[in-house]
Amino acid sequence: MSARWRTGSPGQLLLAAALASFLFLFLILPVATVVYVAFTEKGTGAFTLVNFADFARTDLFVRSFWNSLYVSAMTVVIASAFALPLAYLTTRFEFRGAVLVQTLGFLPLVMPPFVGAVAMQLLFGRNGSLNLVLDDLFGFKIGIMEGLNGVILLQAIHYFPFILVNLSTSLRSIDRSMEEAGQNLGAHGLRLFRRIALPLAMPGYIAGASLVFVKVFDDLATPLLLNVKEMLAPQAYLRITSIGLADPMGYVISVVLIAVSVLTMWLAARSMKGRDYATAQRGGGGLAKRTLGPREAAIAYAIVILILLIVLAPHVGLLMLSFATVWSFSPLPDGYTLAHYTRVLGESSIYIKNTLLYATLAGLIDVVVGGIIAYLVLRTRVPGRQVLDWAATAALAVPGVVVGIGYLRTFYDVKLPDGSSLASAWIVIVLAVAIRRLPYALRSAYAALQQISIALEEAAENLGATKTRTVRRIVIPLMTGGLLAGFVTSFATASVELSAVLMLVQTNADAPLAYGLYVFMQTPAGRGAGAALGVIAVLIVAIGTWLSQRAVDRSQRAHGLDL
Amino acid sequence: MTPTERPAAPVDVRIEGVELAYGTTRVLKGIDLEIRPGEFFAFLGPSGCGKTTLLRLIAGFAEADRGSVRIGGTDVSGRPPWKRDVGLVFQSYALWPHLTVAANVAFGLEERRVPRPEIERRVQAALELVGLAHLAGRRPSQLSGGQQQRVAVARTIVVEPKVLLLDEPLSNLDAKMRVSVRRELHALQRRLGLTTIFVTHDQEEANSICDRIAVMEAGSIRQVGTPMELYERPANLFVAGFLGAANILDGTVASGAFTLAGGARIPLAAGAVPPPGAKLMFRPQHASLAADAPIAGTIVHREFLGATVRYALRVGESDVVVDVPFQSGGDLHDVGAHVGIALPPERALYLAD
Ligand SMILES: Nc1ncnc2c1ncn2[C@@H]1O[C@H](COP(=O)(O)OP(=O)(O)O)[C@@H](O)[C@H]1O
Ligand SMILES: [Mg+2]
């Protein structure tokens, strides 16, 4: 009997098969379709590279490609400029500002970059608050939000915490004797940091930086909201929406997006090979933190406050815009009103309802699928379980636009009983969003399951419980905290997903909040309402993040898992 | 200019009245020490007694609450580690994994802004000194434990520090390596003439290579002396027990003799003045067994060790070990036999805790 459990019971095999079909239908098939279309001749289906040749011959696409690369690389540079000083200050000094950095520094993660786009233009654009004041006082303007610059700044503000978190974790895990040996030989301060700590923390930095690069390269919503069209993801979107599903260029661009994502991840992994120093170190701890002198402290606070001001600008701008009567060609709004909130909570409340529904469903799908995959991988020997894991994780490398295009193309011809296309059904939006969040939910599920000692399950089986009953009575209750955290994370981020959604929304009645925000922001008159929706989105995500943190803490305390 | 060519004039290290507490835990309780120029000095004591802390204090990584550290006459208390010119070889070696062996060794010279050609020459010379010149291009992770240890030593001595500090440098090596590496260290120290402090919890290591030893217990120094002095004339029961095997028996001092709990009287040697609360201490090889000897005991165990026979005896409430030279054809005492222990008065030491 036990031997059969080890190779997978019929029930487990059935579950695995169901998940495999799910992943095949909603991830592999759409992506494969996109790749297939890109490499085949229209009509005949014969293999061809002609579409790629067309891509390479079209100036606009080549320019867009270089623009996307430039924006991604510059975002990494600017984000590093934010993250490096903050990581250095908070990990190497006794610094009260560290709490400030930890709380405020992570705020950008709560708000997707596109949400603050318009607010940033009002603050820093050509006719934004800063430039109006500068022009008035000194007679010049600065173009930090012009064109690609705007995308870079906004993305850097949003994504620098990825670098900060990874880099700080690495810095904290460096054995303190590594830096002490440097001090003993005469190095100290920034020089010591640059020569010893930073190289040793490089794996963490590369992990964060490559993630930022890929995310920015794939992002559709931010450039669109800033009206920057000459980048790859917007080009793919515009081809499909303006020329149609039959135009091959959208597919070619999708393949380029996937290829660059995969290549970046591969290069990052390769450059980190043999540099995983953390495992080579004994003990742990990090260097004893030094207290700052008064002059150093003043400089440190100046840096932290400057960075935090920049980082908080989109939030502040969004908040002001959501209460503004008219805000145009003036440093501050003319007056304040609640009308935008009344409007979005009234006539446009369908956006909020849709968002809550979609995000809840997406979160549920992720938790169930992620939880089952984690269980199959960690606790059974069902054949092919590694493939499930691999497929679900591969979703990381699939840009939102590609999911959108793939779904449209794959499900367009699938007719529902009422004669409409599956591609236009709202459930497809939910599935697209769920697939994009699956890798993260899967990781929470792994973490939750790994905390449960196998002995607890064996004890239940030893007392006569079947596998199924053991799962129901032991595993699921103990995993609750982790699964809940996974759910809320998926829920929170799903509620602000736009890249995939933009393609798939067919009618306003089916649109979620992020889409509504996008539509509102297209017209000056709609900005206030768009900002109000943005503030609501930020609140939903913030509350979700807070709840998930609480759920994790609670379940860990309840189960005595002091981590 | 290399360490081999020009041994710098060695300096002394003076530690005066050093107190250090972490929170409410007193880790160093009034340390006074004088380490002489060019001496190979050991801090010896059980794990957790404060040896590493004292070493880190000298290197500038820990700050004393009271007291001072002088190196070559200069008070360095309050100076940061990078301005102390004290070379510390870490217990974990702390070799930087992202740098090659040569780059590890060059680091300190680069920090001192030494010109590149000279750096190369001195790195080469230091690696030759520890016999690793052929591994200059390797990463630390590609070296064995013993090789890593030698790189750590080379990295430290290449900058010609005033003092060399070694924190349990042999503890990460296997037993066989330890003996050969400690000899190398000793030879190297002699060649450089560098004032060196060696931290260890292993009395054999300290005895075999150090000129003098400070025996530490719970944050205090119990005795300072050469290995022979500590063995022959321990100042207290802790030092006696920590360096070599010791038999310790309770008793009282009265009218020129030490009377054991069981009634046996050991006459005090001329000039012996037992401190208050003293106990009798003697080494196993200094006593002998005889039927009519004064200290009565019962043999509970016997081990044949080749040159000697080791008897474990029960004397009243205490256990005593006596080593007797083995003579071929001689009679051995059997387990269970009642025998007497004879102890020459001059071999009896009277020590307090
Ligand atoms: N940074 C510290 N904070 C608190 N206690 C410490 C610290 N460093 C050492 N100690 C304590 O001081 C005592 C002496 O430590 P240490 O000098 O490392 O001993 P040794 O090297 O002799 O084994 C130990 O009890 C240890 O727990
Ligand atoms: Mg120690």
Image: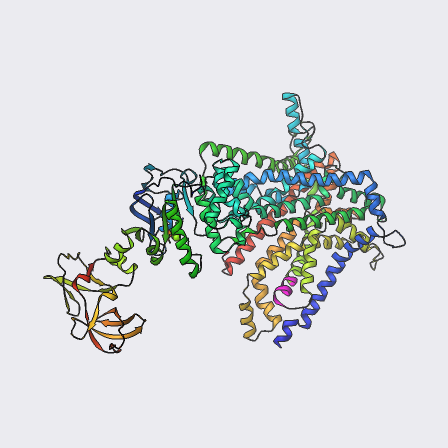
What's drawn in magenta, residue-wise? A372-380
Q: Is residue A378 magenta?
A: yes
Is residue B106 visible in the rendered structure shown here?
yes
On the image, the x and y values in percent for residue B70 come to 33, 39
Above or below for A220 versus A429: above
Q: Toward the viewer: A483 or B157? A: B157
Residue A126 appears in which quarter of the rendering?
top right
Q: Residue at x 70, y 52 (%)?
A: A436
Q: Toward the viewer: B229 or A486? A: B229
Q: Toward the viewer: B84 or A345? A: B84
Q: Toward the viewer: A130 or A527? A: A130
On the image, the x and y values in percent for residue A316 come to 61, 36
On the image, the x and y values in percent for residue A231 come to 75, 40
Q: Residue at x 73, y 43 (%)?
A: A220
Q: Residue at x 44, y 45 (%)?
A: B156
Q: Residue furthest left?
A: B255
Is residue A357 visible in the rendered structure shown here?
no
Q: On the rendered structure, is A256 left or right of A298?
A: right
Above or below for A208 versus A25: above
On the image, the x and y values in percent for residue A28 come to 75, 57
Above or below for A208 versus A310: below
Residue A45 appears in which quarter of the rendering?
bottom right
Residue A224 appears in which quarter of the rendering?
top right
Q: Residue at x 27, y 55 (%)?
A: B228
Image colouring: rainbow
Quadrant containing the N terminus of chain A in the rendered view: bottom right
